[in-house]
């Protein structure tokens, strides 16, 4: 589990591409604001949302499995209700097995669940629990 200041700072410093599960095209949703915030700070944000075609110039994908294999994803930011956290983390574990990529699973505030944490542990996925990626970015880089 990634919890220390230096570890979170390292994740945010080294990441280039963030896949955002639950990224909304609705500008009034926090996930939409977070996607724009991260893009403005130099990250490539890959939206995962089966209901949208494109968000902020990036093609939306139905799932992680649909992201082309030549795209290296450093962080998977889970922006869904906590009841879906385990499912999202299992998707990351399955995707890791298919692609060999080992991204950080980052759960937003109140999104993590014990089941999701257990899945991450079992599959040796780095995991950030219940932290807003925008707040953490501001903490380290502002």
Image: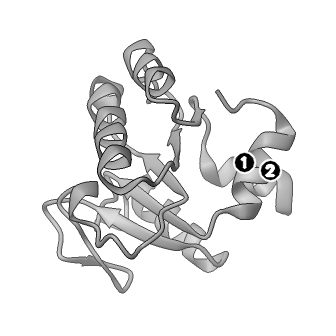
In this picture, residue 135 sits left or right of residue 105: right
Residue at 53% in and 33% down: 109
Residue at 28% in and 56% down: 64
- Which quarter of the image is occupied by the C terminus? bottom right
Residue 67 rendering spot, x and y as whole percentages: 28, 67
Q: In this view, does 95 lie above or below 70?
A: above
Q: Residue furthest bottom?
A: 57
Q: Residue furthest top?
A: 114
Residue 53 rendering spot, x and y as whole percentages: 18, 76
**Cα gap from disc 1 to disc 2, whole angstroms:** 8 Å
Observer-side mark, 1 or 2, equals: 2
> Camera-side residue: 30 or 106?
106
Residue 22 rendering spot, x and y as whole percentages: 31, 51
Q: Quadrant of residue 42?
A: bottom right
- Which structural element holds mark 1? helix
> Camera-side residue: 139 or 92?
92
Circle 1/circle 2 CB separation < 8 Å: no
Q: Which colour scheme is used?
A: one colour
> Camera-side residue: 138 or 11?
11
Would you call the spot at circle 2 few (<14 residues within 10 Å), some (14-19), or many (20 or more)?
Answer: some
Residue at 42% in and 60% down: 19
Quickly name the residue at label 1: 136
- Which quarter of the image is occupied by the N terminus? top right
Residue at 59% in and 73% down: 43
Quickly name the residue at label 2: 9
């Amino acid at each position: 589990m990634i919890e220390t200041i230096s570890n979170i700072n390292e994740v945010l410093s080294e990441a280039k591409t963030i896949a955002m599960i639950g990224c909304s095209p609705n500008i009034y949703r926090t996930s939409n604001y977070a996607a724009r915030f991260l893009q403005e700070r130099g990250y490539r944000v890959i939206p995962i949302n089966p209901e949208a075609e494109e968000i902020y110039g990036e093609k939306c994908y139905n799932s992680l499995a649909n992201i082309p294999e030549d795209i290296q994803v450093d962080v998977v930011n889970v922006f869904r209700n906590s009841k879906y956290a385990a499912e999202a983390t299992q998707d990351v574990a399955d995707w890791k097995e298919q692609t060999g990529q080992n991204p950080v699973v980052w759960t937003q505030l109140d999104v993590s669940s014990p089941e999701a944490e257990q899945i991450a542990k079992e599959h040796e996925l780095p995991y950030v629990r219940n932290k807003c990626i925008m707040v953490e970015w501001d903490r380290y880089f502002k």
